[in-house]
Amino acid sequence: MHDQAARLRERLQRSVQTRPTRLVTVTSGKGGVGKSNFTLNFALGLMEKGQKVVIFDVDLGLANLDVLMGISPKMHLLHLLEPDRTIWDILEKGPNGLEFIAGGSGFTQILQFDDQKLDTLFSRLEHLQGYADTVFFDTGAGISHESLRFMLSSDEVLLVTTPEPTAITDAYAVIKMIHSKNPHARIRLIINRVGSRQEGKNTADKLSLVAKRFLGMEIGTLGYIPDDASVSKAVKQQKPFFLSYPNSQAAKGIRELVDAYLDNAARNPQNDGGGLRGFLSKMKNLIR
């Protein structure tokens, strides 16, 4: 039964090979700004619009997407190296059928893989090409070699920050690091926990202005999420606020971000990053 289901799923995947798949890394300059919570709820917002989404939890130290959903994953990335294992075996199911791959130490071990293991792993990951509209990589906060590899390999980076001065300073440090490796990287800001839309705009404008003045780099803004007590309530309940409190200000903020994201994708449909194969090729070169 398991083999039959796997074959059916692979046939489904092959039938949608022409669907472009965007590879997006979500990161932040410091912990505690709501990065993983944003990734989870933003993904659910995209699903509400009919989008197919897969999340990789690649926070090596504090993987917590499963905690936010109240789920205990059975598998992680390294299980892909087992004989006859497919990508469909390690995809975990979350709320509303959200599919994700659990984080953990597996991503660190990739750095020590020989070419044969890397080729096996990446060839099996390639089956996600065309399966999802967007694949999100939820990285650890701050700058690490591992996180930077995902940022540099993705089609774009969503950088989450808050209006707090320390968060803004750390977010700019991430921008500088990305710029030093790829001045043409595409970065968009999400300003979380804003007291007002104006506060969010002021924060985004400040970061964009500094990046333009000192780096010559254009930084876009996806949008803002209001400070909302419903978010902390949902975290304590281990449920996404987008589902538990769909009429909250935070959920409305997510919907606005989703609309902005999809509008941009519709106006810029060309994905010149090579899709998942291009991402994996860049990642492989960076590992070596």
Image (cartoon, rainbow, N blue to C red):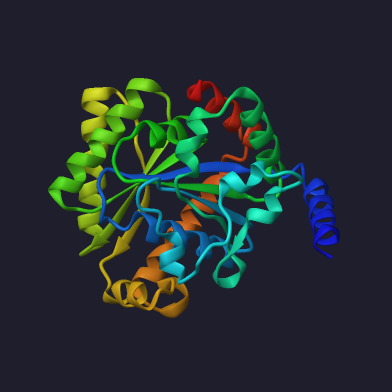
The correct choice, above or below, for 25 with respect to 200 in the image is: above
Asked whether, in this view, residue 212 is left or right of residue 5, the answer is left
Asked whether, in this view, residue 163 is left or right of residue 59, the answer is left
The correct choice, above or below, for 28 with respect to 272 in the image is: below
The quadrant in which residue 128 appears is top right
Residue shown at 44% from the left, 31% from the top: 149
Residue shown at 27% from the left, 37% from the top: 208
Asked whether, in this view, residue 288 is left or right of residue 190, the answer is right
Decide which of 80, 30 is in the foreground and name it. 80
Residue shown at 35% from the left, 53% from the top: 62
Residue shown at 43% from the left, 35% from the top: 151
* Whole-percent x, y for residue 273 in the image: 58, 30
In the picture, the quarter occupied by the N terminus is bottom right
The quadrant in which residue 60 appears is top left
The correct choice, above or below, for 133 with respect to 119 in the image is: below
* Whole-percent x, y for residue 185 in the image: 43, 29
Decide which of 115, 182 is in the foreground and name it. 115
User: Which residue ends up furthest to the front in the rendered image?
Assistant: 83
